[in-house]
């Protein structure tokens, strides 16, 4: 897929997903986000950049760790995600955060602006993740650290059939490189090529729990990366795609719910 087209698909796809994102993924992504924050070692006074911040699930936790002496800037390619995050900040009275719509591959910050950069499950959607990681390095001060989490290997993610199911109904692949960053040592190698040092990688196995078939389908189709394509399906196409996806989850069904395996890879590097 052309890179400009892919960015448009991601931007407007996540606009569609914003309303469903937190209730579909907050609990499921928590293990990766907590591990990322542990490695980031955000202390009082830390200046943090949270790229691909979504609705702020990591941003607000980082802001609490940084305290009033620190600050967290959240960026996302989706305007609707940024607007939702800003609304959350106002509702919670959180003053040490700000949010901007921005492409992680072209960060609009000066060199050495931050003590820490985090990216929780966003790199898989970027046309050029290496460019984004180089940007992480650029905006970090010397001695700063970047931490990124991605989904792991395809064979360990039981929900992975969502992509071929949707791809078979559209003209191009929705996320052509989705699982590549979590395979082997790919993400660590990209960090090394961006000149990070003291690189460490962790793999985390997890389970994604959905209480009903409706919740599982909403998360996969409406609250995630295929939301734009799904929004354009006819009702008949949606029904068939949902049925096919639930069939792929059948090995993980427990009574009326689903306990779906997943894997995360979390990598930290120092500048």
Image (cartoon, grey):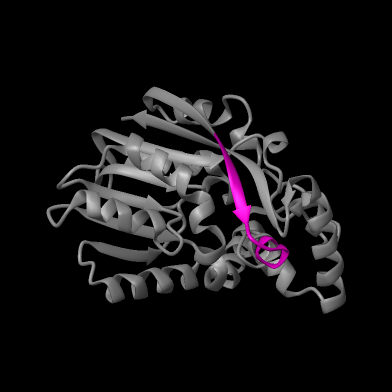
Residue 173 colored magenta? no
Q: Is residue 173 left or right of residue 218?
A: right
Residue 246 locus on image (x, y percent) = 79, 57
Point out residue 261 in the picture as x, y percentages from the top left corner: 65, 41
Magenta span has 209?
Answer: yes
Q: Residues in magenta?
A: 205-216
Residue at the far left: name it. 69
Is any atom of residue 109 visible in this view?
A: no
- Residue shown at 67% from the left, 43% from the top: 177
Residue 191 relative to residue 208: left or right: left
Left or right of 188 in this view: 16: right
- Single out the residue that lies furthest toward the front: 255
Residue at the image position 21 percent from the left and 61 percent from the top: 96
* Residue 228, position as x, y percentages in the image: 67, 68
Residue 197 occupies quadrant: top left
**Residue 5 showing in the rendered view:** yes
Name which residue lies at 59% across and 59% down. Answer: 7
Q: Nearer the viewer, residue 66 or 206?
A: 206
- Residue located 64% across and 60% down the image: 211
Looking at the image, how many numbered discs can be counted on the residues?
0
The quadrant of the picture occupied by the C terminus is top left
Residue 139: % across, % down:
31, 44
Tell me if residue 139 comes above or below residue 231 in the rendering: above
Pick the front one: 154 or 192:
154
């Amino acid at each position: 897929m052309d890179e400009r087209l892919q960015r448009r698909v991601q931007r407007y796809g996540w606009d569609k997903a914003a309303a469903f994102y937190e209730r579909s993924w907050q609990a499921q992504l928590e293990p990766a986000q907590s591990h990322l924050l542990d490695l980031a070692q955000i202390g009082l006074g830390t200046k943090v950049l949270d790229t691909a911040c979504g609705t702020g699930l990591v941003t607000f936790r980082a802001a609490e760790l940084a305290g009033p002496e620190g600050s967290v800037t959240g960026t996302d390619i989706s305007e609707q995600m940024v607007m939702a995050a800003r609304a959350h900040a106002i509702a919670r009275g959180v003053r040490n955060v700000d949010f901007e719509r921005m492409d992680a591959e072209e960060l609009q910050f000066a060199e050495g602006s931050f003590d820490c950069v985090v990216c929780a499950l966003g790199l898989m959607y970027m046309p050029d993740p290496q460019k984004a990681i180089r940007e992480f390095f650029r905006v970090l001060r010397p001695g700063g650290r970047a931490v990124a989490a991605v989904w792991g290997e395809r064979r360990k993610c039981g929900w992975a059939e969502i992509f071929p199911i949707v791809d078979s109904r559209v003209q191009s692949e929705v996320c052509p490189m989705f699982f590549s960053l979590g395979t082997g040592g790919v993400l660590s190698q990209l960090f090394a090529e961006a000149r990070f040092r003291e690189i460490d990688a962790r793999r985390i196995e997890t389970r994604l729990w959905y209480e009903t078939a409706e919740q599982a389908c909403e998360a996969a189709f409406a609250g995630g990366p295929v939301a734009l394509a799904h929004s354009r399906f006819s009702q008949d196409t949606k029904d068939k795609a949902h049925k096919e996806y639930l069939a792929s989850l059948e090995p993980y069904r427990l009574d009326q719910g689903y306990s779906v395996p997943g894997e995360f890879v979390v990598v930290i590097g120092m500048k």
